[in-house]
Amino acid sequence: MTGSPFALAAQRVASGASHHDEAATLVASMTIDERLGCLDGDTPFWPGLLDMLGGGYYRHAWPAAHVDRLGVPGIDFADGPRGCVIGAATAFPVSMARGATFDPELEERVGDAIGAELRASGATYTGAVCMNLLRHPAWGRAQETYGEDPHHVGEMAVALTRGLQRHVLACMKHFALNSMENARFRVDVTVDERALHEVYLSHFRRVADAGVASVMSAYNSVNGSWCGESTALLTDILRDEWDWDGFVTSDFIFGVRDAAASVRAGLDIEMPLRMARAMQLSAALDEGRLNLADIDAAVVRVVATLLRFAWVFQRRPDPSVIASPDHRALARDVAARSTVLLRNETVDGVEGDRRPLLPLDRTAVRRVAVVGRLAAVANLGDGGSSDVHPPSVVTPLEGLRAALGDVVVDHSDDDTTIVDGADVAVVVVGFTKADEGEYLDTTGTATLAAELFPPMDDPQLGVGTATTTVSPARGEPTMALGGDRRSLRLSTSDEALIAAVRDRGVPTVVVVMGGSAVVMPWAVDVDAILHVWYPGMEGGRALAAVLLGDDEPGGRLPFAVPADEADLVPFDPDADAAVYDLFHGQWHLDRIGHQAAYPFGHGLGYTRFGLRDAVVDGDRGEVTVVNTGDRPGSTVVFVFAGMTESRWERPARRLIGFRRITVDVAAIATVELPLDWSALAVRSAGRLIDEPGRYEVEIGLHAHDPQAITLTADR
Ligand code: BGC
């Protein structure tokens, strides 16, 4: 790159020249083939597909838009959301777990670590920022996003992007309304202006405003247009309305159908192989369905962004960061801070006192029974595009054994007799990548493959028209068939196991693994429940630390858990069409007047907090938090607001701010709360407007907190 036309242009940009003008000059010096070559992946289709199916996805980055003659560095893509998918990198807790930390500063550190590992693994561009809203917790890829609330998802995604973009270019995905998995290649989502802008896009806009380099379009269609060919999404909203300055890539392999339409709509690079565009674009130019100006506009956007981020390509990556002790320590810390204590009942203590079961009283524990098949296996989450293969994983059982030293820790997958004589039973249940995660429906993809795959393009592999089905396996390591969940309950065998353990009369902690909400009709029968998500490579150590009280369970629910799944909006994994409106999750429960089993923001700690002296003044609030318990601790303060007298139908309360705060024993702390009133803007006549009037504001420790302080704000 040094001394190349790109490098010289980058120097001029660094000294203040316009990256667009410099990019336009570079693009004008490209041949037509070089320009077309920038609009899709650099790898020929068939060898690329076979490499990917053979595990290449997890071995190297995927190049696009490299123009060696001019030194244009192009992009080298690798996922992902819970860590670098290439090689043996640090596996962090999944994004939903990190959402539960409600700690953007921590998330920025995670982004920084993932970004450094990606760069050290040969990537310069990542799909780590998955931020579709959790419309329904049965979504198979729920674990890859942060939760159900746009303000919260936006804050966390901005933080991740900031951290990542210290090392690589990031793309936010999947644009837009991609929150069903099994039907992702076919479902059309109908959405009106209000729901689109107020609910499903507002958090994307936050990340666009924060300078994300790129956007990945979604597979599904919205209001009748495939997202990769949607002028409304990719040009009218993203570029014209939001004034965002970056490039758009397609989702992989099945993301572009009509190549010319995708270019005209504003999709810049088809990823990751030479496919629809390689087959269709030359003819489209010849036939006048596409102009050179359309091609140039896309290439200029790509090159301009590369110039803006030129330092990424100039820096020397540091391989020692990959799964480094610092990054593992961060993964462990995040796992503890994301663990949600849903329930913690009092039991008899050793001195005849009554105390909450957790944290366990170390001095009184001599024998622990660990039951459940998930206790002794590595369970890191989705087995698809976000899969990470760390060098080692600490399971719950290993974590407990390591932390408990001489204490006897028995384990069985399903023999509940081991509980007899134990001081506490820990039942580890929930889901794996076989139950939820990314999904390739073989029939659907075979039909698409027959339609979209190019003829054989590698003489070594064969010639003629190739037809194939896409195997769900991506080689070694393989891709699991997860998909959407069809029920929010645990499996019948998990529920039976919990009942059988409880019947043995020993204090029982249930540890639930999974990417989002679990409906727990059995909750009242057990003493304590911890939701630990897919907690990453150090998850077992974090769990032990939380059980023993070395760490507090820091997580708060980034969605509402209903008492009954019928209380949620409908979710049909087999749908061809879906309608998204203004209400889902906690907002929907509020609207129908049903109480959540655990509301948005719920999560117990090991101490207690009180709130007082709340103030709201313009764009900031303030409240005093008092630690009334007997140990230091942290909690999350939430600010919800609504307008009862609104001219428009709206959620009764929407989140407009949150802050994690740590307070010492018997201490008080005043917390500043930046307020995002734009979360309450209403889309009307093509604009977002702030409705004047009186807003009710609630400052509490979760939605519907009985001790919340209620104020009003006139705006
Ligand atoms: C997923 C994307 C991912 C891409 C690359 C697709 O199947 O939907 O989220 O980034 O694959 O693996």
Image (cartoon, helix red, strand yellow):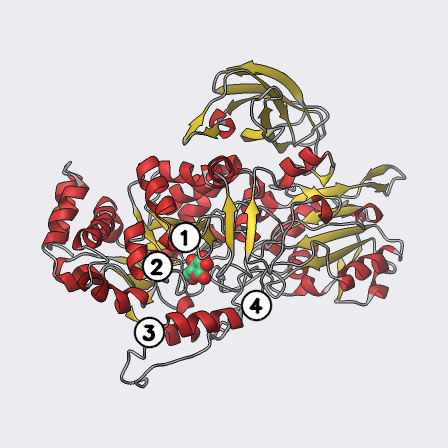
Measured from the top left, where is residue 692 in percent x and y?
50, 17
Nearer to me, 507 or 500: 500
Q: Which residue is mark 2?
A: 77
Q: Quadrant of ligand 1?
A: bottom left
Return the disc, 1 or 4, that comes first in the chain's sequence.
1
Residue 587 vertical position relative to residue 274 in the rendered view, above or below: above
**Chain-order first, disc 3 or disc 1:** 1
Secondary element at tag 2: strand
Q: To which residue does mark 4 refer?
A: 481
Q: In the figure, is residue 665 to the left or right of 127? A: right
Q: What kind of residue is marked 2?
A: Phe
First in sequence, mark 2 or 3: give its number.
2
Closer to the chain start, of discs 3 and 4, is 3
> In the rendering, at what x and y percent does residue 474 appear?
46, 72
Q: Mark 4 against mark 2, which lies toward the viewer?
A: 4
Which label's residue is closer to the chain start, 1 or 2? 2
Distance in Å between CA atoms under marks 4 and 2? 23 Å
Q: CB of mark 3 within 8 Å of CB of mark 1? A: no
